[in-house]
């Protein structure tokens, strides 16, 4: 499992260095991701937003995410074939059994969206609680502690500070997972000034950013 983690880490770093064309347009960033995934249920303070985050990868909306769906979703937000393949292996192998408690392991490595909170890794910001609910205070804490230059945005150095601060002892899986997630997010969604805006980060936690990235990638492909 550590080999797969390391593979994804280095492939992701390679992708970050080469994927500059995948950045969001400035117009979309200024909108603050208001138009994201349609919520079919009434919003609630107890809503499992982690499920909404994962639902983007459930392409056929049957409650299960298979590796080929993860691959397709990654491609739709602009990831290359190599990273999308590694992500599909890493995500599904890593989360399948933990989201299917009491069930016999499946070689198809499905992830159950309804149990996605069971796959939550360590060394994170704590913006999701153990039930997959959004914790506003922990989200705000990210910027209170690390946004030194601008109150509602993170620079690259401040993001590195955040990643280091989140590290837990002997948590290799969580450290790599957290680092990869934040680094790719920064490359894909930083603005023209190199800042990762607060509302952009919020869009990751509630799942709306993925839909925006998908639309941006589709526009680039149609115009090329």
Image: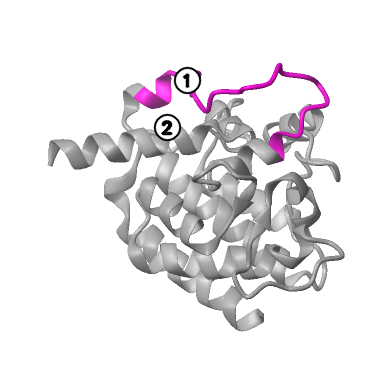
**Observer able to see residue 13:** no
Work out whether residue 86 or residue 97 is closer to the camera in this orientation and state it.
97
Percent x, y of residue 56: 53, 41
- Residue located farthest toward the bottom when viewing the structure as drawn: 3
- Crowding near the residue tagged with mark 1, few <14, some 14–19, many ≥20 C-alpha atoms within 10 Å: few
Position of 209 with respect to 2 (left or right) is left
Which region of the structure is painted magenta? 28-50
> In the drawing, does residue 116 fall left or right of residue 189?
right
Q: Which mark is residue 35?
A: 1
**Residue 100 seen:** yes
Residue identified by numbered label 2: 212
Residue 82: % across, % down: 37, 69
- For marks 1 and 2, give the CA distance: 8 Å
On the image, the x and y values in percent for residue 179 come to: 60, 59
Q: Is tag 1's residue or tag 2's residue first in the polypeptide sequence? A: 1
Q: In which quarter of the image is the C terminus?
A: top left
**Dot 1: element:** loop
Queried whether the magenta region covers residue 60, the answer comes back as no
Q: Residue at x 42, y 48 (%)?
A: 187
Q: In which quarter of the image is the N terminus?
A: bottom right
Magenta: main secondary structure equals loop
- Contact, CB < 8 Å: mark 1 with mark 2? yes
Residue 17 at x, y percent in the picture: 35, 61
Residue positioned 61% across, 64% down in the render? 92
């Amino acid at each position: 499992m550590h080999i797969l983690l390391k593979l994804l880490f280095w492939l992701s770093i390679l992708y970050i260095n080469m994927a500059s064309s995948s950045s969001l347009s400035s117009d979309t960033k200024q909108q603050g991701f208001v138009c994201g995934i349609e919520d079919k249920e009434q919003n609630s303070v107890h809503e499992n937003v982690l499920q909404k985050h994962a639902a983007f990868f459930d392409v056929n909306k049957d409650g299960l995410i298979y590796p080929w769906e993860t691959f397709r979703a990654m491609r739709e937000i602009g990831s290359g074939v190599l990273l999308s393949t590694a992500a599909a292996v890493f995500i599904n192998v890593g989360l399948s059994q933990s989201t299917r408690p009491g069930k016999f392991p499946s070689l198809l490595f499905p992830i159950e969206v309804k149990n996605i909170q069971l796959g939550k890794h360590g060394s994170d910001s704590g913006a999701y609680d153990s039930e997959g609910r959004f914790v506003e205070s922990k989200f705000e804490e990210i910027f209170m502690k690390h946004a030194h230059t601008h109150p509602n945005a993170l620079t690259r150095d401040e993001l590195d500070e955040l990643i280091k601060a989140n590290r837990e002892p002997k948590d290799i899986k969580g450290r790599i997972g957290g680092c990869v997630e934040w680094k790719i997010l920064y490359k894909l969604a930083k603005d023209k000034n190199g800042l990762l805006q607060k509302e952009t980060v919020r869009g990751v936690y509630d799942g709306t950013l993925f839909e925006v990235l998908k639309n941006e990638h589709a526009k680039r492909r149609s115009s090329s």
